[in-house]
Amino acid sequence: MQDIAKNIQRIKAEIAAELIKSGRKVEEITLVAVTKTHPVQDIETALKSGITHFGENKVQEAVRKLAMLSAPYAGFHFIGHLQSNKINQLLALKPLLIHSIDSLYLADKLHRALGRTNRTQEILVQVNVTEEESKSGVSFDNAKEMIAKIAGYSTLYVRGLMTIGKLDPDPEVSRPYFKQLKALFDEVRKDFPEGFDYLSMGMSHDWQIALQEGSNMLRIGSAIFGNRVHGDRK
Ligand SMILES: *Cc1c(COP(=O)(O)O)cnc(C)c1O
């Protein structure tokens, strides 16, 4: 049995301790509790225990769970690979941020869907920094060009970048990739005077490293809710 409230308290304290080392403030960091595969009851518990942002990676699962959720929250984040035929269902859930825009094709479909309902959407561009085939994301080399093109869509606000580190038990393995994405983030940021300010990287096993390398948005699942029943970390 996981003590979700205790886990949240512990992680928040650990994040605060890590930030002190670099002189950064807790308010600069968004902690997204990743609730995929976990029951609605656990999301409710988290929302009553200091979590305000949570994320899901499958549209179908999010549709089912959000309908049952009664506790208030500041933001629902979509962090998984988005299939274009699920866009309308996702938009109905009013995601605060979609972390996983990984192609111009998807950006274009999203733009059209938003245009039909006169809406706008904040997104991150997912970069496959580790260049692993099993992962979604635009390649590092193509990222800048894609960001520039997506920024041209009137309905889409590119708020930053997202990546998934290596799923290696040793989190140090991911440090060079996090460094690389931070450098790209800083570079792109120069062309975006306003609003390009989220760097979403770091999960349960590697968030310390990600934070040290400049992340300001952590996506943490198993360290809060325990192991997933049917793990899918894509
Ligand atoms: C599942 C998932 C996470 C959280 O993973 P944990 O290792 O459980 O913290 C973070 N980001 C994405 C994109 C995920 O799919």
Image (tube, grey):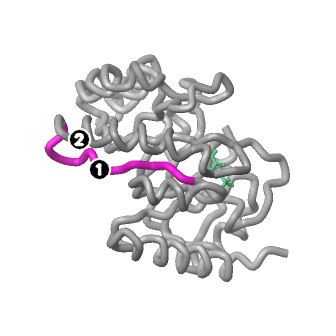
Are there few (<14), some (14-19), or many (20+) residues within 10 Å of tag 1? some
SS at mark 1 in the image: loop
Residue 94: image x %, image y %?
45, 49
The residue to which callout 2 is attached is 189
Residue 22: image x %, image y %?
37, 68
Residue 137: image x %, image y %?
52, 28
Q: Seen from this angle, which residue lies furthest left?
A: 193
Q: Name the residue rendered at 56%, 31% in the picture.
A: 130
The residue to which callout 1 is attached is 197
Query: For residue 35, what is the image quadrant?
Result: bottom right
Task: Find out if the beta carbon at label 1 lies less than 8 Å from the nearest ligand 1 atom.
Answer: no
Query: For residue 189, what is the image quadrant?
Result: top left
Q: Main secondary structure of the magenta part?
A: loop
In this rendered view, identify the residue nearer to me: 122 or 20: 20
Residue 132: image x %, image y %?
63, 26
Instruction: In the rendered view, tell whether residue 84 sits above or below residue 234.
Output: above
SS at mark 2 in the image: helix
Identify the amino acid type marked 1: Asp
Instruction: In the rendered view, tell whether residue 162 sits above or below residue 130.
Output: below
Query: For residue 7, what is the image quadrant?
Result: bottom right
Q: Quadrant of the C terminus?
A: top right
Asked whether residue 29 appears in the rendered view, the answer is yes
Q: Name the residue rendered at 69%, 50% in the picture.
A: 170
Are there few (<14), some (14-19), or many (20+) residues within 10 Å of tag 2? some
Badge 2 vs badge 1, beta-carbon distance below 8 Å: yes
- Asked whether 83 falls inside the magenta stretch, the response is no
Q: Name the residue rendered at 49%, 64% in the picture.
A: 31
Q: CA distance from mark 2 to mark 1?
A: 7 Å
Q: Name the residue rendered at 70%, 75% in the picture.
A: 4
In this rendered view, identify the residue nearer to me: 198 or 70: 198
Segment tinted magenta in the rendering:
192-202
**Of the image marks 2 and 1, the number of the one nearer the N terminus:** 2
